C-alpha cells in the first residue's frame, strides 16, 4: 500500500481505532526545550524510533514533545502548521488510511530521559453500522470539509472552507433477488 510523500507503510488500526506502527512508518516530532526547538522526522525501524533524541540537546528544564502521523506537508504561511488533504473518496483501503491523522503530545520532566507518546486520532471518525433489512432507497449522507491544517505544536485542526470540498457517501449494499 502506498502513502503520500513516498511512505509505503501505514500504522495498523482495528475498528476501534487502536493499533500499532509498522516497519518504515514515519512521524514528525516537535521538541521544545529551554535551549532548542527542533522538528525531527523519526522512522520506526526494528521496533524502535530512529534516530534517538538526545535529552541533553534541549537543555536542563522540561521538554515538550508533540508528534504527528503521517508526516504531512508544511504550510507555506506558518512553519508549525501542516496541511491536511482528506481523500474525498474513502471507498478503498488506501484512501481510508490516508485520511487517518494521528497526534500525540507529552511533557518530559527535567530529570526524565524516557518519554511515551500516546497517539490519538486528530480528526473525527464515524462508523455507521446498518442492521436488519436495508431498503433499496436508503441514502446516508455524511458531509465533511476535506482540506485544512493541523498544528504540530498542539494538534488543533482548522478547516479551510475556501479550498475544501464537501463529500458524501452512499452505502453500498447487496440486495437479494428472490426467485
Image (cartoon, rainbow, N blue to C red):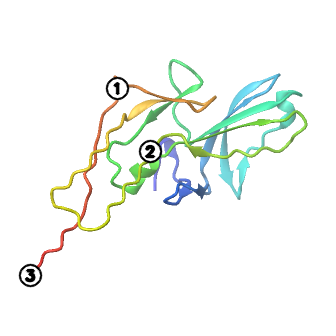
Q: Secondary structure at mark 1?
A: loop
Q: CA distance from mark 2 to mark 1?
A: 17 Å
Q: Position of residue 1 (x, y in %)?
A: 46, 56
Tag shown at residue 99: 2
Q: Position of residue 151 (x, y in %)?
A: 57, 28
* Comparing labels 2 and 3, the label whose residue is closer to the camera: 3
Identify the residue under disc 3: 179
Q: Which residue in the rendered view is the most extreme toward the top?
A: 77
**Location of residue 137 by image quarter:** bottom left
- Does 6 sit above or below residue 163? below
Q: Taking 164 as reference, is 31 left or right? A: right
Q: Secondary structure at mark 2?
A: loop
**Location of residue 168 by image quarter:** top left
Residue at the (37%, 34%) spot, across then down? 145
Residue at the (78%, 39%) spot, across then down? 53
Q: Position of residue 4 (x, y in %)?
A: 47, 43
> Which badge, 2 or 1, comes first in the chain's sequence?
2
- Does 77 sit above or below residue 103? above
Q: Secondary structure at mark 3?
A: loop
> Which badge, 1 or 3, comes first in the chain's sequence?
1
Q: CA distance from mark 2 to mark 3?
A: 42 Å
Q: CA distance from mark 1 to mark 3?
A: 50 Å
Mark 3 neighbour density, 10 Å: few (under 14) some (14–19) many (20 or more): few
Q: Name the image quarter holding the C terminus.
A: bottom left
Tag shown at residue 73: none
Tag shown at residue 163: 1
> Which badge, 2 or 3, comes first in the chain's sequence?
2
* Comparing labels 1 and 3, the label whose residue is closer to the camera: 3
Amino acid at each position: 500500500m502506498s502513502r503520500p510523500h513516498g511512505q509505503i507503510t501505514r500504522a495498523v488500526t482495528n475498528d476501534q481505532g487502536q493499533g500499532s506502527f509498522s516497519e518504515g512508518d514515519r512521524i514528525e516530532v516537535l521538541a521544545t526545550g529551554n535551549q532548542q526547538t527542533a522538528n525531527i522526522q523519526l522512522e520506526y525501524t526494528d521496533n524502535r524510533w530512529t534516530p534517538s533524541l538526545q535529552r541533553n540537546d534541549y537543555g536542563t528544564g522540561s521538554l515538550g514533545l508533540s508528534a504527528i502521523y503521517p508526516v504531512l506537508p508544511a504550510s507555506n504561511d506558518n512553519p508549525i502548521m501542516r496541511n491536511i488533504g482528506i481523500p474525498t473518496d474513502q471507498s478503498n483501503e488506501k484512501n481510508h488510511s490516508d485520511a487517518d491523522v494521528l497526534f500525540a503530545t507529552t511533557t518530559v520532566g527535567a530529570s526524565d530521559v524516557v518519554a511515551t507518546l500516546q497517539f490519538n486520532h486528530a480528526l473525527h471518525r464515524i462508523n455507521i453500522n446498518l442492521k436488519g433489512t436495508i431498503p433499496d432507497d436508503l441514502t446516508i449522507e455524511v458531509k465533511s470539509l476535506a482540506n485544512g491544517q493541523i498544528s504540530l505544536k498542539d494538534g488543533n485542526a482548522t478547516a479551510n472552507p475556501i479550498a475544501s470540498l464537501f463529500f458524501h457517501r452512499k452505502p453500498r449494499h447487496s440486495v437479494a433477488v428472490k426467485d
